[in-house]
Amino acid sequence: MSNSFSSKWKILREELKKLLTRNWGYKLLSLFLAAVIWSVLIAQDPTITREKTIPDVTLTVSGTDNMKRNGFIVTNDLSDQIQDVTIRASVPQMQYQTVSAANFVPRIDLSRVRSAGTQQVRILTTNSSSYGTVLEVTPASVTLEVEEYITRNRIPIVRETVGEMADGWYTTSTTLDPTTLTVSGPRSIVESVVRAEVVQDLSTVPAVEGVQRSALSFRLVDQQNQTVESDLLEVTSMSVLVDSVIAEQTVYPTKLLTFSQTGVITGVPAEGYEVKSVTFSPDKIRVAGRADTLENLDSIFTDLTVDVTGRKESFTQNVRLRRPSELVYMSQDSVTVSVEIGEVISEKVFTDVRINVTGAEANLSAVLEERYADIVTVQGPLNWLNSLKGSQLLLRVDAAGLTEEGTYELPVLCEISGDDGQEYTVKTSPSAVTLTVRSK
């Protein structure tokens, strides 16, 4: 029996030897198929996991609106804290290559904040059977600086103008839409805002008749007139975010008009006095209105008259202007009227007035060919002329300096005694006479 077992074992060894030393191709194929089957079996088994580290994860931030509704807002910049996060997770072998941070929904929820001050908010993730379990998040939380979130309504908008309308054009007062703003944000910033300011450059308003609208940017300012700027502020009107204000005005053409003197002066000055002139200061004003209206206007009338009754001296008076209803603008509402009053200048004629010779040398005789002036016309103030008499007229020719005999044509001179320095002019007919000079 021992010989029989030995023989069989020997045969088996020979067969194994043949099997191991022959058919290498089949052997390698079998080995490969076994490895593939083994890999598939491992990949399909969710209980087989590997640890994976995912760096540079960016967190999502949720609950911002809920946080504001709760009366709080984050004031510090979170960009650095939410962009440099690392996740370490246990991931199924079958998902190892495809899994990413997004599969774990890394996030912070701001709606959980319930108080102001420095807050530590934990970074949240979501585990799943498909993508595995988060083992660790680094850092584990985000530091928040939290402040009360408030809203202030009816912040006034103040308009400042620079520049001027194009020459020949006028614009009505500008209306703003809206007229107030609502500002929301951190209490410390919102409470510093006292008004909003817009600057309108009138030189940019189109010189076209009609309603013109333009959008003006605004700035928020504090009590010291410093600009208040922050990305945390929300500016709204009627719950709509705004970044500009609409300015509306109506543009009209203008025209320079003079003043009409018709009906300006009433009454009569004192006897012997008259109105010499009436002038206006300024002499013209600028008005604005529709183009078709301005075509039919040439002058402006005063609303009141200037009474000169009994006046003897010039004077000025401020008078309101009559504003036609079709005009939308006059550069001024009143005008200064200057009334010049002076004595009435008249003439008085005297006839056959004697002419005398004065200044003749003692050794010479001077004889006039005509001894009387036919007509002497005196021009001067009427009241003075009324009291002037012929006996006050002194007509003469001046022979002074005539030292030789001969005939001379000399002008007739006139003096009036008792003129009291009154200004007057005199004309004589003839205006010159012949004087004969001889030795005695």
Image (cartoon, rainbow, N blue to C red):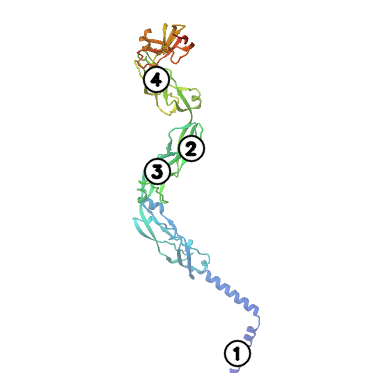
Q: Give the amino acid at mark 3.
A: Ala
**Dot 3 corresponds to which residue?**
196
**Dot 2 corresponds to which residue?**
203
- Residue 1 sits in which quadrant? bottom right
Say which label, 4 or 2, has the lower sequence index: 2
Report the disc number at residue 340.
4
Query: Residue 155: where, in percent of width, then height?
Result: 37, 43
**Dot 1 corresponds to which residue?**
9
Q: Are marks 1 and 4 in contact (CB under 8 Å)?
A: no
* Left or right: 438 in relation to 384: right
Q: Nearest to the eye among marks 1 and 3: give it.
A: 3
Near mark 2 (Cα within 10 A), the count class, few <14, some 14-19 or many ≥20, is: some
Nearer-the-camera pick, 52 or 116: 116
Position of 417 relative to 206 (above/below): above
Q: Residue at x 48, y 22 (%)?
A: 298
Separation (CA) of disc 2 from disc 1:
117 Å
Query: Residue 416: where, in percent of width, then height?
Result: 38, 12
Q: Give the amino acid at mark 4.
A: Glu
Q: Secondary structure at mark 2?
A: helix
Separation (CA) of disc 1 from disc 3:
107 Å
